Amino acid sequence: MPAERVSSPARDRAAEMSGDPSAVEGPLEGYHHETYVIPLPTAVAGARPGRGKCREPRSNLLWFDRRCFASEETLLSALQGRVTGIPELIEVADGVRLQRFVEGRTLGSLHRSGQEVPDSIAAQILGLFRQLARVGTGSLEVERECRPEDRSAEGDTAGFLERLVCFAEERVYRENLERFPGLFASLGLDADCFTRLRQHVTGLRRRPFCLLHADLHRENFVVDDEGRLWTIDWELAMVGDPLYDLATHLYLMRYPPAQHRLMAKRWCEVMEEERRGSTNGWEEDLPRLLDFKRAQSVFTDVVRATQVLDTRPESAGPALEQEAVRVRQVLTAAARPLGLDTVPTASEIMSSLARWRRTGARGVVRPGGAP
């Protein structure tokens, strides 16, 4: 028998908007929203029938990244005609807009992590960076989530990175010490890690700011039937150091080494053509920003490991081992920027996670947002 659908406000809203509850598909995988796909009403689809995404923000989320813009839909609306290959917005009622669902397959389903990406796709990714470079600090009038005093001055890449470090320190590490009593410390992670991280990444060169997607990985790229690349999930977009967007992209994409180097080189060519100075000091600063991403991943992946274990009580053993191996990998990769003298073994990490499962304050979730 098919699994019974669990009702939720998001699903009920999708069913109401579609007019046919049986036509609702989902929920789609996604951390920030509960998302369903529905047929677009004929009255608004016009000559272009299709499907739309109906979604609601998930409550009580742990936020791992800063947010810059108050609404993804408002940002996408402002980018129409300026950035190609982004979801179209469809007004289905007064004040109600849906993102048109992009039909196709994710890049990750076509070329999994670690595999080389075809040149045709790589060229389109570089084209996206070119278009983002054209959207400068003062050319985007969209409501911001962060307060003016929390925004870095134009070109202040050091200040931009400091705000990212502060978010990881205050909102991912400090605010979750109570929820994960002793867990961070048992892995060798303490407040001094952030002091050492700041020392490790200091000295960034100035670069002109532009719009960043800030989450360009294989599951946020969709390839349609004609081979066109679409970029989805602009939830974490921000204005800042363009080299940070490249570092995030390279870190998340896991290109083979040769393509990693080639993409960095071609990115530099594209960015200098579009906005001079965008690559200032990139050879020294890109490794620093990649190290920041490695350090950031340690804290977020530890938290995510606990979330995985919370949802799999029936398979605690295999899941515990799998998450311990993954946490050790990110700890090893970040040992230098975090100043870790030693990295616990997978067995030691399993013990730490198991102890948290027995004694930790599970279920205490702090809502997130911009600092």
Image: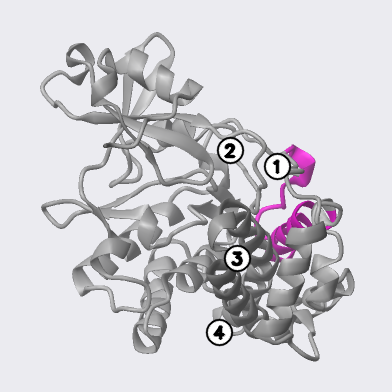
Q: Position of residue 47 (x, y in %)?
A: 10, 22
Quadrant in which the C terminus appears: top right
Q: Nearer the viewer, mark 2 or mark 1?
A: 1
Query: Could you tell whether 111 is left or right of 36 in the image?
Result: left
| CA separation in Å, label 4 and label 3 | 13 Å
Residue at image location 58% in from the left, 75% down from the top = 321
Residue at image location 46% in from the left, 67% down from the top = 249
Q: What span is in magenta? A: 147-174
- Please tell me which residue lies in front, 15 or 125: 15
Identify the amino acid type marked 1. Gly
- Please tell me which residue lies in front, 174 or 223: 174
> Residue under circle 3?
207
Residue at image location 44% in from the left, 13% down from the top = 95
Query: Could you tell whether 161 is left or right of 92 in the image?
Result: right
Q: Position of residue 38 (x, y in %)?
A: 28, 26
Disc 4 residue crowd, few under 14, some 14–19, many 20+, Cα 10 Å: few
* Label located before the other in sequence (2 or 4): 2
> Residue under circle 4?
283
| CA separation in Å, label 1 and label 4 | 34 Å
Q: Is residue 210 above or below residue 196?
A: above
> Residue under circle 2?
69
| CA separation in Å, label 3 and label 1 | 29 Å
Identify the amino acid type marked 4. Glu
Q: Which mark is residue 368?
A: 1
Q: Nearer the viewer, mark 3 or mark 1?
A: 1
Disc 2 residue crowd, few under 14, some 14–19, many 20+, Cα 10 Å: many
Q: Position of residue 1 (x, y in %)?
A: 26, 37
Identify the amino acid type marked 2. Phe
Is the residue under label 4 in contact with that under label 1 (CB below 8 Å)? Answer: no
